[in-house]
Image (cartoon, helix red, strand yellow):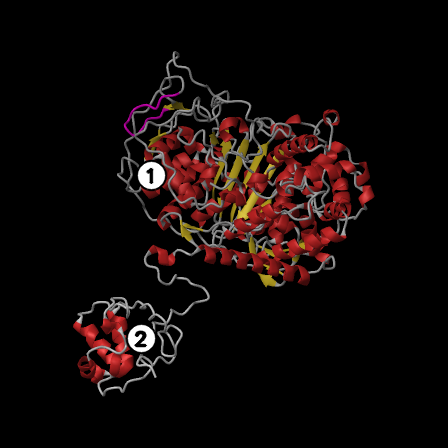
Amino acid sequence: MSEHRRKPPQPQGGGRAAARRGQAGSSAGRRAAPRGATGSPTDSYGSGSTGAVSEEREYGGRAEARRAAQRSAGGRRKAPEPGRGGRRGAPGGPNGPGRGRGRAAPPPNKRFIDYPRAGKDGLARWTPSWRLVTGAFLAFMGGLIAAAGIGYAMVGIPKAQDTALAQNNVFYWSNGKQMAATGGQTNRQLVSDAEIPREMKDAVVSAENASFYDDKGIDPAGIGRALLNMAKGGETQGGSTITQQFVKNTYLSQEQTLTRKFKELFISIKVGQKLSKDEILAGYLNTAYYGRNAYGIQAAAQAYFGVDATKLTTSQCAFLASVLKGPNFYNPDGGVGANASAEQNTKRAEGRWSWILDRMVEVGRMTPADRAKVGKFPTLKKQNSNLSGQSGYLIDIAKEYVAKKANLSPEDLEKGGYRIYTTFDKEKVNQMAAAVEKTRKSFLNAKKREKDKYVQFGGASVDPKSGAIVALYGGEGYDKGHYSNNANTLGVPVGSTWKPIVLASAMQYGTYETDGEPLSPLTKYNGNDLLEIKDQNGDPIMGNNGKPFRQKNEGTTAWGEVTLRKAMEQSINSPFAQLGIDVGLSKTQKMANKMGISSAFFDKGNIRNVSFSLGTSTPSAIRMADAYGSFAASGEHYEPYSVTKVLKDGEPLEGFEKPEKQIAMDENVANNVTDVLENVVKNGTGKKVADIGFPVAGKTGTTDENKSAWFVGYTRELSTAVTLFRTDPGKGKLLSMNGTGGVTSIHGGDIPAQVWKDYMAEAMKGIDYEEFPPAEPLGEIIEETPTPSVAPSPTETVEESPTPTPTPSETDTSPTPTPTDTCGEFDWQCDNSNGGQNGGTDGGTTSSPTPTETETDNTGGNGNGNGGIFGGPSG
């Protein structure tokens, strides 16, 4: 046997491994070179210092020697000895006996997903490799395809459900008895594809889904947008083709959820494979909602034009395609909410009608020559309604409240299936309607007097202790062709019924003379006609003519120094015009906000003017009744509400808890205002209701030219507002009521007060009424006022009153804002054609003076009002 093949006896000290360990230790950690690498005879297995090996042997044998060698080599594998790489015991072998350089370190364990990345430091450790990114993308796409395949296989085309025919919404009175049922399957007639005009199909396809005849029933980009909207917390609408709309209307619920959207996606694909495009389009037009309680093209054709679907003209088809965009905002009758007035909706519908016709030309579904022949916007037939009396107005108020609180679109709500329990008291609603009709019959005769035409009544009654709307009067009824709700209307200034709010702000916040301390109602102000109004520096406020502004009263009575209590009693303008400036117009605005009157109701043209304090603002009857409820409830305010509970599929919806109490003003401030308003009823402009038989406080209000008249009054149990105004149905602007009813002029103390009295006398029957709380003395009494101003010299130009010296019951007139000033974005009684303020011939201002900047005009307050819910746009 060769010398190199024979295994020499191993000494007791641990053999070559120990020797190597010793050598490694003696080399102070230097890396050992492989055998043969140096050319030295000692590199061979047969050589070496046996003494050294023997000395190291006792420290642990071969394993320890290998570990020492690895440590000394910095963990790196040595090159294998030439000629021995494959032999037993060679480096890396499983049973190496100690020959050569020993076993190498095992490679690190491999993970299925190398993240965070092994062997990397810092940012590189957390940066995924291209393999990982590619693998993740492929896995995601594979999973998506698998899920889509499974979903497609599992979801079939369901049977068309009865819910496609829309369920009723049922409304209940406050006593739980049914009021009315609306919507539902009473107005739907299905027609065949052949009965739908080609122009209707072309209009809808052009407007909603131009690629309808070429697509596969879905719009991937649109679906992506819808899902993105949902991820952001918005609606999932906006990604629907006509096929998807048909599927949603026919087979699915209207809920906006991810589950429903995916079902819609898969069913749409299958429907697109099973049905022809014309069948799908006919199905969509037969199930869509068009407004006027019309479901399907045939019902819509009858509802809007009184013809069958086959007889529709091109113009009429374009209109019905416009309404499909959203009946609540495109039905010219008007919809739910302040942004859906008849005028606004008509403007939208006309714009979209014209756009659709142009779009048909653009996408090649109509020639320019045919477009030119279409003509004008189509004339709609008069709307028929099975809702008589006040039920239509009550339902509109309730639907608007439900849509806001439950975050439902009016179209979704119209699909039906809701049980809506309202605050409306059937007896009180009937009592208010009876009071209006009694006065109407005795007061108006449109056949004899032209001025009796177009006169409108409105009213609302609210529980001051909860904010519940118990009754309202909106007009003669839907069945009589009156669709605007006069209890919730815009654009009718409240006149002198605003003065108690100015007085309340003076009692709550004081004036610049009291340094914020409350002002007593016994403080005296100059009540003379044509009083020069001064700013908080004592300088005259200049009118538009460049001369000091003088406030006009109704008549020329020289009242002299009068207390604010007396000024309220006789509704004298000049003291409250000056008081508003002394308090600060922003303080009055803040008080109004706290009483539930949103800044949206302020007349923007007069918000910084003297006339703001005299009632140029335009809150609804509901809002005025609710605001005066704060006086009745000793300073507590509750938001007005109309619905107590809503059930859907037997389950209650959230968000219909009663409004929480808020503090509008100090208790004694409210009680002092009530004391002043009790005196108005006993001795002033409200004497018509003084003998009603229970404690009453209230205020009359009239605007110049008698364009509107109000009476707002209350007991501890009920706060009620009644308004009277006259409108031009063609232009929508307010008209003067002078001569109406055969009398020279109309004031809040006569016709509105009579309606209020007749209603409240019945509504309070059987109620154990409370006395008003006593008013404790309040605030600082200021006796001195600016030196009374005499009438202007002949060289000064002012508007003289054409009326004789008024009796006390005729002195409650306040200025009417100009049409431009009055018109808000959604005001329906507006005339935007004229500008500039008319002269205050019976209580108004001769110009629109603005206080100097010493009185900062901030709105203040938190704007408690719901705005659009009851009486106007949210602000």
Q: Give the percent coordinates (x, y) of residue 655.
A: 52, 56
Looking at the image, residue 753 sits to the left or right of residue 362; the answer is left
Element at label 2: loop
Taken as a whole, is the magenta stretch helix, strand or loop? Answer: loop
Query: Mark 2, mark 1: which one is toward the viewer?
Result: 2
Residue ID at (50%, 58%):
135
- The image shows residue 124, relative to residue 242, as above or below, that is below
Residue 641 covered by magenta stretch: no
> Which of the pair 72/310 is nearer the observer?
72
Residue 522 tag number? 1
Position in image of residue 400 (x %, y %): 58, 47
Is any part of residue 662 visible from this angle? yes
Q: Quadrant of residue 723?
A: top right
- Residue 765 locus on image (x, y percent): 57, 54
Residue 725's place in the image compared with 188, above or below, is above
Residue drawn 55% across the image and 43% down it? 756
Dot 2, how many residues are within 10 Å of its Cα: few (below 14), some (14-19), or many (20+)?
A: many
Furthest-top residue in view? 795
Indicate the quadrant where residue 143 lies.
bottom right
Residue 131 x %, y %: 47, 57
Q: Where is the N terminus found, in terms of image quarters?
A: bottom left
What amino acid is at disc 1? Leu
Q: Is 69 on the left-hand or right-hand side of 817?
A: left
Residue placed farthest to the front in the image? 1
Residues tagged 2 and 1 counted as in contact (Cβ below 8 A)? no
Left or right placement of residue 328 versus residue 871 in this view: right
Q: Earlier in the sequence, mark 2 or mark 1?
A: 2
Report which residue position mark 2 lands on.
100
Residues rendered magenta in the picture: 532-543
**Quarter location, residue 561:** top left
